[in-house]
Image (cartoon, coloured by chain):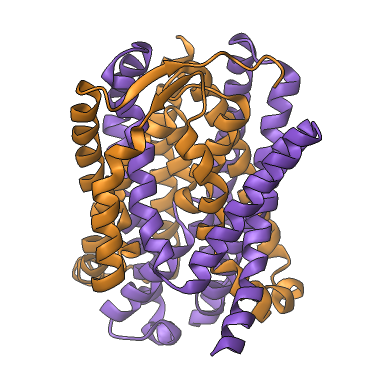
Chain colours: A purple, B orange
Amino acid sequence: MSFQEALYHPLLYTLVGMVILWVLGLSIWFAQSSYRYALKLGFTKTQLKKVITSSAITSIVPSLAVMLGLFALAGVLGNAWPWLRLSVIGSVTYELLAAELTATSMGVGFSELSSIGLSGLINVMFVMTTGIASGLVILMLFGKKIQTRVRLAAAKTHSFGTVALECFMVALVVTFLPAFWTLSWVHFLVFLTSITITISLGLLMQRFKLKWLKDFILAFALLGGMASSLLWHTILEVLR
Amino acid sequence: MNYNDRMHFVGRLGIGITLVLLFMVPVVYGLYLGAMPTLGQFLAALFAVAIIFVPIGIAETLSFTPILGNASYITFITGNIMNLKLPIAQNAQVLMETDKGSEESDAITTLAISVSAIVTVLMMSLGVLLLEPLRPIMTSSAVQTASEYVLPALFGALVIGLLKGTGQVVVKGKMKAGLMPFIVILIVNLFIINTSPVSGLLLLVVIPITILTAKKLYSKGHITIEIKEKDTQS
């Protein structure tokens, strides 16, 4: 069997499909359980519908970016394997880099992967899976312990634990923001556009009492911010 | 078994089964093709990937689990954390105005992330089915350019909520705790190197620094906790 035939073999699709169905089932279970528990905690069905709608709509645009990763990987690794890697554990940035690093360590460029033969292909699958599994193993071993401590900290409203919990978010902002801002002018301007849209829509919502808008602010700001990158690119090109 | 114990049990079992299924793919397919790599080939290739991604994987788990609560299980199983799941979690917490670490926040975050995971899996499946018809659109320069900016656009949309906090418990002055690491990271990014590829690892350093600084500021009264009245109209 050739490398290309192996990439599109029905058995590979069947194996990948089984894993994806399992993960889909697990996601549905988590959604159902948390929905029922949220009702018990006093949330109304209308409130939960808001959460579901907003989360679903907001997920569409970033998922399109993940789909682009699928297109990038599919040219070399076929459809089935990238479909699995980008649906389970993986992320666009990780999978593209992992595929490239694996190819390089096997002595070929990413676009030349087809020259490594079938055992090379299976090796790529093993390496890409093993490399990303560390986080899951840690979560399996220590997830409950970490969360029990978080619960205890959050329960004491007027204690430093509450502040410490907020610090995780502060740390996230201060770690990631400078890295985005300084990547390029367009990155910085997209960030500013997105924040401007968020503030403007928030004001609009308050001024005209458009409560429904609250569910869509993130989606609009995300879409507007990304679309503005085309404008910023053009403006910066003209200025150069 | 109560809700929390059930979540932990299914979460851990879910991770175990997912890992077995993931490794089943190359094992079964390798045996079918009669093309299993040798241990030497595997370890040589793994080294280059593991040296970068194992520390990042561990760092991300330790950093994000306190934020995500029980949703961590489904988040890490389905991946795409920074570019999708974390913003979705924050958005849901802002929408429902829940306090971090509370049971309400946990349930809402888990619901939001599970829905997001379902949407992403379905969209990826659709993408595979429609790979050829979608190729001209997905590979157009406009879509490719715009998709490079998902993260700054997401952060721009979320940063206000991140800084304001979500629930009734408001921590005033918390950003002061992050000021020093922010300035240092900004300088490093401006003049030395972009830290994006190692942001996950960097978080492991920034989180304890931020918490220690916050502790000092909290004890001196520069960071305070206030309880705001719940907006009954929202």
Number of marks in the rendered image? 0
Asked if B42 appears above or below B113 in the picture, the reply is: below
x and y, in percent, of residue B150 in the image: 55, 60
Above or below residue B62? Residue A152 is: above
Q: Residue at x 70, y 36 (%)?
A: A214
The quadrant where residue B189 appears: bottom left
Q: Quadrant of residue A74?
A: bottom right
Near-viewer residue (B228 or B196)? B228
Residue at 61% of width from left, 42% of height from top?
B116
Is residue B167 shown above or below A195? above
State the image coordinates of residue B202 (x, y, percent, origin top left).
25, 53
Of A49 and A201, nearer the camera is: A201
Q: Residue at x 43, y 64 (%)?
A: A181
Asked whether residue B154 appears in the rendered view, the answer is yes
Q: Position of residue B87 (x, y in %)?
A: 53, 44
Of residues B133 and B84, the one drawn nearer to the viewer in this rendering? B84
Which quarter of the picture shows residue A118? bottom left
Specify whether A25 is left or right of B126.
left
Residue visible at 49% across and 50% down? A88
Q: Is residue B60 above or below residue A6?
A: above
Q: Is residue B157 left or right of residue A115?
A: right
Residue A9 appears in the picture as rendered: no
Residue B178 x/y as whole percent:
29, 43
